[in-house]
Image (tube, rainbow, N blue to C red):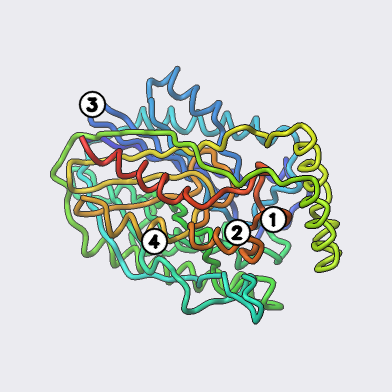
Amino acid sequence: MKAGVCTRDMTFPELIGNPSIHDRLFAKVLVLDDGEETVCIVCLDTVGPFFPEVREKIHQQLGIKHTLINCSHTHADARDSRDEDWETRMEGLIFSMAEEAYASRVDVSLRVGRGSAQVGYNRRLADENGVVVMAVNKEGAVVPWVNTLAAHTEDGRPLAVLFEHAAHPVITMTSGDISADFPGHAVNYITEELGDGITALFAQGCGANINGFPVSFSIESGWHERAEEAGRKLGRGVIEAMSNSSEIKTDRLKVRSTRVTLPTQELPSMELWRESCERLRILSLHEFRRQEPLLQSIKEMIERGEWSPSEVQFDINVVMLGTEWCLVTLPSEIFCEYELWVAENAPFDHNMTFGYTNEGPGYIATDKELALGEKGGYEAGCFPSLWANPVNRPLAVGMETIIKDGIASLWTD
C-alpha cells in the first residue's frame, strides 16, 4: 500500500472581501494506492461546494476513478462574501493537490482505531406542542466516538491520520471571524502531540442533527476559546484511537458505488397550498416571508402538475480493505442514526462513515422524524415549511430503508 498527502491554505482573503481571520482554512488530500485501485480523499474547511468537475478532471488526467470530497461544514467559512473567482481558484487548488499527493506516494502500513469523543449534543427537541425545535437535547442520539485511519511509513513514522467525528462546527458561527472551528483546533492538537510531520485530516461524519457545543448564538463571547476546548477534546480522542489502533493486514482496496432514488411526498393540491400558506402566515409571519419565494415556486409546480426536479438521487460509496475495515461515504447532511446503524451492522472489524461527501439533496432525516409531518422541524420539515431542503421537494417516509439497503448492497459480493 502506498499513500501520499498534501496540505494547502484555502483561506484566500483576497477573494472574500476584508475578512477578520481568527484561524485559517485548509484543504488536505490523502491518496491511497494499492497498485491497482486508487482513492483520493479531499477534506475541506468549508460548507461547500463539492466540485464535481474537479473529480472528473482527476479521473481523466490522473487516472484516479474515486475522488471523495468531504466538507467539514464549518459555518465560519465566509461563504456569503466570496468573490466570483473563488470557486475557480479552489478547482485549481484541489487538482494540483491531488496531483502532488499522488506523485509523493510512499510505502505505508495502515492502522485503524476508535476513541471516545463527544463535542456536541443532539439539536432536536420537541416543545410542549410536540413541534421539534433546535435546542440542546442531552437525551438525543449522538455519535460518541472518533474513528481514525492512520498511515505509517516503513520506519514507523505517522505520515497521516484521517479522523472522522459527527457534529456541526457552529461554535464560532456568529463570531464574525473566519475559523475552521473545532476541527481546526483538533488538527492543531494532533500536530502538537505527534509533530509537524503528520498530516491530520478531519472528515465530517453524520452530524446533521448534532451541534457542536455550545452553539455560538447561545453565548455572548468566548467563541474561539470554546471551539478550542472542543477541538482539543476531539484531538485527545484521536490520540487515544491511534494508541489503541490495529494494523490492517489486507493490502488491496475495493471500492463500490451505487445510486438510489429517494421517494418524495405527493405534490399538494392548490387548495392545500392556500390553506397551508395561510396557516404558516398566522403561525409565523417571519417564517412565511422567509419561505415566500419557495412557496411561490411550489405554486408554479402545482400549476405544471409536477415537482422539480423529477427525481431525488442519492450516491453511496464504500471503500473496503478485506473484512478488516470499510469507509461508507454519504452525501448530504445526514442524521447521526445512519452512522450508528453502520457501526452496528457493517460486517467489518472496523468502520468509518462520512456524511457531507460529494453532492446531495439537503437534509436526510430518519423515517421516524419525517413521519412527524409539519411538526418535524428544521431538518425534517414538510410542506409548507420545507426549511433547509434545497430541492423544493419534501422527502418521504420509506427513504431510510432505501438508503440502508443501498449501503448493505455494497458490502456483499
Label 3 Cα crowd, 10 Å radius (few <14 / some 14-19 / many 20+): few
- Looking at the image, tell me whether mark 1 or mark 4 is earlier in sequence order: 4
Label 2 Cα crowd, 10 Å radius (few <14 / some 14-19 / many 20+): many
The CA span between labels 3 and 2 is 42 Å
User: Which quadrant of the rendered structure holds the N terminus?
Assistant: top left
The CA span between labels 1 and 4 is 37 Å
Residue 35 got which mark? 3
Residue 190 got which mark? 4
Q: Position of residue 180 (x, y in %)?
A: 57, 57
Please name which of the two marks, 1 or 4, marks the residue nearer to the observer: 1
Badge 4 marks a residue whose secondary structure is helix
Badge 3 marks a residue whose secondary structure is loop
Q: Is residue 359 left or right of residue 38?
A: right
- Looking at the image, tell me whether mark 4 or mark 2 is earlier in sequence order: 4
Residue 387 got which mark? 1
Q: Quadrant of residue 340?
A: bottom left
Q: Position of residue 227 (x, y in %)?
A: 55, 69
Label 1 Cα crowd, 10 Å radius (few <14 / some 14-19 / many 20+): many
User: In the displayed structure, would residue 298 be above or below residue 208?
Assistant: above
The CA span between labels 4 and 2 is 32 Å
Give the farthest residue toward the top: 60
The CA span between labels 3 and 4 is 30 Å
Badge 1 marks a residue whose secondary structure is loop
Q: Nearer the viewer, residue 29 or 68?
A: 68
Residue 379 got which mark? 2
Give the farthest residue toward the bottom: 128
Give the farthest residue toward the left: 249
Label 4 Cα crowd, 10 Å radius (few <14 / some 14-19 / many 20+): many
Q: Residue at x 24, y 35 (%)?
A: 253
Q: Is residue 54 left or right of residue 127?
A: left
Badge 2 marks a residue whose secondary structure is helix
